[in-house]
Image (cartoon, grey):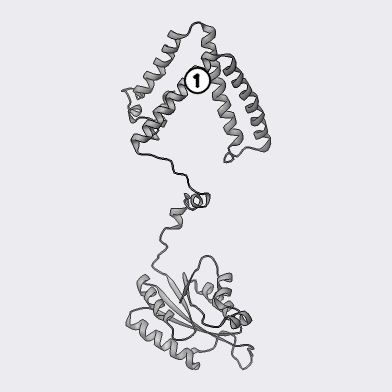
Amino acid sequence: MIGLFYLMARDREMPRQFKWLNRHGVPIYPLIISIGLPAVVLLFAANFTALAGLYAIGVVGAITVNVGSCAFNRTVGFTWYDRLLFGITFAILLFVELTLAHTKLDALQFVLAVLIGGLALRAYTLKRQGLTTVTLHRQVAAMVTPELPATMQSHLSDSQKIMVAARGITPVLSFALDEAQLREATLCVLYVKEVAVYYTGGGTRLGRARWQDDPEANAIMSLMLKLGAEREICVVPLYAVSPDAAATIVDLSATMGVDFLLIGATQRTALANLLRGSVVTNVAQQLPETIQLLIFG
C-alpha cells in the first residue's frame, strides 16, 4: 500500500503530500494510512470470521484483476495457451469474488467504501492538478505516437544535395536556387533529352552526351551556372539522353546521393498524360524513400 500510494503520487494521481519522506526514506502519509487502516478494521471487526471475510474479498479481487489484465492485455508477449490459462483462472476467480460479495455483505460494504474513497481522492487530486481526460478518434490518436518527435526532427546537414529536373527555363529553377541558398546545399541541375528511339552507335553512349551540344540544355545550364556563381551556390550540370526520363531521373538521383528532388508540375493535357504517362507519377513511384520529392507548380 505504501508503494502504491507513493507511485500514484508521483504520477500526480494522489496528493503530492504522499511523496513526502521521513528521515528513513519512507513516505510519511502512506505509512500512516497503511498502519491506521488495518487498525481501524481490527477495532470495528466483530470477530475474526468477519475479518477473514474482509481479507478474502480483497485478496481474491486483487488476484482476479491481475490475472484478468494478463489475459486481455495484448501488449504483453504471452502465448495463446498462457492467455487461455489466464482466462480460465480469471473466470473462476470472478465467480468466487461474486460469491463472496453475495454471501458476506460486510465485506462487500468494506470493499465499496475503499473503492469509493480511493477513487474520490484520485478524482479530487486530478482536478487540483488540472489534469483531464480527452476522448480522441482512433485516427487522431494514431497521429500522436512516441515516434512522432523523431520523424519531425531536422535532417539538415552540411553536405546536402538538391537536384532539379529541368524541362526549360521555368519557375522551378528559381525555387531550386532559393532552396539551395537557404540550405547551403549543392544544386544539381538535370536535363534529360527524351527520345523515342535511341541509337547507341557513333561512339556516344546513353546518358553520356554533352550538354554544350544541345542548344536548349546549353541555355539552361549556362543561366544556372551564372546565377549560381552570383549567389555563391555550387551548381553541377547533369545531362542525359534517354527514352525513359523518369527512370533516368531516379537513377541519377540515387547515384548522386541527393537529399531533395525538385520537379516542376507538368502542363500537358490530360489526354497526353494518359497516352504518354506522367513523369512526376513515375518518379514518385520509383524514388527511394531516403530522397524527398518536392513538386513545384
At a point 54% along the width and 77% down the height, the residue shown is: 249
Q: Is residue 138 visible?
A: yes
Left or right, 113 with reference to 243: left
The single residue placed furthest to the left in the displayed view is 23
**In the rendered view of the protein, which quadrant contains the C terminus?**
bottom left
Q: Which residue is mark 1?
A: 111
- Work out whether 9 lies above or below 31: below
40, 258: nearer the viewer = 40
At a point 46% along the width and 53% down the height, the residue shown is: 148
Residue 53 rendering spot, x and y as whole percentages: 55, 13
Amino acid type, label 1: Val
**In the rendered view of the protein, which quadrant contains the N terminus?**
top left
1, 193: nearer the viewer = 1
Residue 183 rendering spot, x and y as whole percentages: 37, 70
- Work out whether 272 lies above or below 201: above
For the image, the number of numbered tags is 1
At a point 54% along the width and 88% down the height, the residue shown is: 209
Q: Is residue 54 visible?
A: no
**Crowd around label 1: few <14 · some 14–19 · many ≥20 (10 Å):** some
Residue 99 rendering spot, x and y as whole percentages: 61, 18
Residue 65 rendering spot, x and y as whole percentages: 56, 28
Residue 96 figure quarter: top right
The single residue placed furthest to the top in the displayed view is 47
